[in-house]
Amino acid sequence: MADKEKKKKISQIDIYKAWCKACGICVAFCPMGVLGRDEGGYPYVKSLEKCINCGWCEIRCPDFAITVHAKKGEIEEIRESFEKEEEERTTAPGE
Amino acid sequence: MAEITKLIHKYLRHDKKFPHVWCPGCGIGIMLGALIRAIDSSGYDKDDIVLVSGIGCTGRLPVYVDFNTLHTTHGRALTFATGIKLAKPRLKVIVVMGDGDAIAIGGNHFIHAARRNIDLTSIIVNNSVYGMTGGQYSPATPYGMKTTTSMYSNVEHDFKIAELAVTAGAAFVGRGTVYHAKLLDSLFEKAFHKAGFSVVEVISHCHTQYGRLNRMGSAVEMMEWQRDHAVTVEKARQMKSDELQDKFVIGVLVDRELPPYEEEYEKVRKWAKGVDKK
Amino acid sequence: MKKKKRKELLLQGNEAIVEGALKAGCRFFAGYPITPATEISEILSVKLPKVDGTFIQMEDEIASLGAVIGASLTGTKSMTATSGPGFSLMQENLGFAIITEIPCVIVDAMRGGPSTGLPTSPSQSDVMQARWGTHGDHPIIVLCPSTVSECFTLTIKAFNFSERFRNPVILLVDEVVAHMREKIAIPDDEEIEVFNRVKPTVPPEWYIPYQDTPRGVPPMADFGEGYRYHVTGLTHDIRGFPTSRPDEIDPFIRRLFRKISQNFGEMQIGEFFMTDDADISIVAYGCVARSAKRAVIDARERGIKVGLLKLNTIWPFMRTAVEKLVAKSKIVIVPEMNMGQISREVKRVIKSDVKVFTINKVDSTIITPEEIWARIKEVS
């Protein structure tokens, strides 16, 4: 790997609770164990940094209720955009 | 990957009530996602797609998507689709059916549509049971399984849908599972681009009825069963038949050049009009 | 200006049905061989490809009507032809065409029934099946030719009604009329009125596929023309999506019926023959109407004033015509080659003290003028 310190990609995982039916498929089939199930059975992001952005959760969700995409760019830029997303996500679309 | 869901939203009918009607964890939603991704990457115009379905859980699919959609009578989807395709061949006609819909009451139409090799794509969601009506056995229910109409266990032997389509004459036949969602994308795309009758059998699960009665666990466990019992076409070739005993083959089973029915009938029109005399 | 001599042909009833269908713009036929309707399939298999149409022989009658409905959805006028056994198989899809309001024409060439019955013999015993064959409350239009010319004209009418009211129309023809040959004068194209379904003029975004209109018939968009709408056999709302709301279901069912009741007058096709001064009137249809005409003439020669009301429209039942009939005649005879499927309707409609007599011939042979004359003598 020429440029050794590879730009660290952090994924953004959005869970669209209005459509999610807590079936547990995304949690079960995430290869990296990124997701956990809360007491209601609904998925939540347990360890985002492990996410390798493979998209298995998204293409296996029967209700299109989870999306994951890689955020490219510098670590700092990531961090402050990360906060912005955090705040955006609290107002989930279609709530 | 988020584009996938943005993309799916592009094809959904948003005035419909979401989340959709299927049970939590049902495989039909996964198949629908693959269907939409395959349609998008195939570049078809929404106006040119006709999505036809029969009656059953799968029958409720077209209502959610923004195409020309037709929800027909039980088992008869392929006959309506045949009429549409012949009357307006430029339309891309896709038929979604359940296992009972396609090969029980619809079996006669299924084998004839394949025999005619009319240019339709037929997607059959096989969850081995009549889910909508509460879990009765279907011609795809394996021997010995328990269902609400075979409580002493099923003494009938099941059709292998994909293999049935191959012998009936379909030009393209593939099988996938809702666990192998990525494979469904490519199978659907190949099926769309195939001239002639293309069939994709999608092994799915009904944990609500069938899974519960046969103690097969939740949707997750049933999808793991699919993962552990599916064997790719290539791998199956090196396996001995007894190893394949409780396995099923996924991937492209057949992909052959056979003249689609509408092109053959175009010849009839020419002969009828005296062009290149028959 | 001397009337131009019309093209005259000697045609079989089934042939005339085909000519009528083609003139009406039928460009798709799906069928399955069955006596006594097979000629329609055979001739269309030759003629349709000539006019860039499509003929297909499906695996059974269920599939045939399914294909016809599919083709009609793309904007193509479509038809199938069968007889009793096939017609019985078609009932579920007929109901689908009714609830989704997709125009199509179904020819039922009646043979002896029930079941396999008498494949090559005539009967008129599918009359009630044509009305109530498919399940659920539903409107239907059923026309019945009694001459080869009427086979031609009524097939065109069937397509026109089907397109205008977005309702399947059944052409009920008995084996005699279907198989007999008769001279027929084919009118020129200008003389033939052909109706095409009303298409939406609003852009796709505003199109509400099943919205009520003054005539009760919503405009119908073809599949593949940009109006991506949903068609389902489930009871649906005005947007075509399934509904379980009573306040949407009731108006929907009533609109289906209103399409027929509101245009009832226009659907009444028949002929009053010498009924003005008739003491006895016959109500007949199909091949029996031919014998009845003969009987009327014979009776009058023998001094009994008899008239005939010939029904070309079987359903909706020609109630007003029968009422007009009994204003004068005090005795009505209903000769039928069944156990009284129309005479029940005549009795239902007649409120007054008019007596209704029937001839119910079910021995596979046609009712003759002599048999009707015998009955006239008996009742007069």
Image: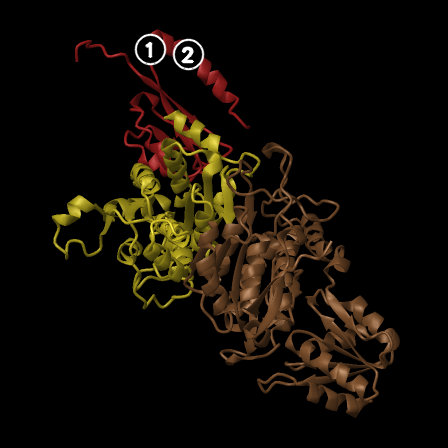
Q: Is residue C77 above or below residue C281?
A: above
Residue B258 visible here: yes
Residue at (54, 58) in percent of width and height: C79
Q: Earlier in the sequence, mark 1 or mark 2?
A: 1
- Residue B56 is labelled as none
Residue at (30, 60) in percent of width and height: B159
Residue to which mark 1 is pinned: A73
User: Label 1 to label 2, Cα distance in Å?
Assistant: 10 Å
Residue C256 horizontal side relative to residue A65, left or right:
right
Same-chain check, marks 1 and 2: yes
Residue to which mark 2 is pinned: A81
Residue C44 horizontal side relative to residue A3, left or right:
right
Nearest-to-viewer mark from 1 and 2: 1
Q: Secondary structure at mark 2?
A: helix
Residue C366 horizontal side relative to residue A70, left or right:
right
For the residue pair B9 and C176, the one nearer the viewer reads as C176
Colour given to chain B in the rendered image: yellow
Q: In red, which chain? A: A
Residue B26 visible here: no
What is the three-letter code of the residue carrying label 2? Ser
Q: Is residue B61 above or below residue C162?
A: above
What is the three-letter code of the residue carrying label 1? Gly
**Which chain is disc 1 placed on?**
A
Crowd rating for badge 1 (residues with CA inside 10 Å; few <14, some 14–19, many 20+): few
Percent from the top left, x then y, of residue C220?
A: 61, 44
Which quarter of the figure has residue C10?
A: bottom right
Q: In brown, which chain? A: C
Q: Secondary structure at mark 1?
A: loop
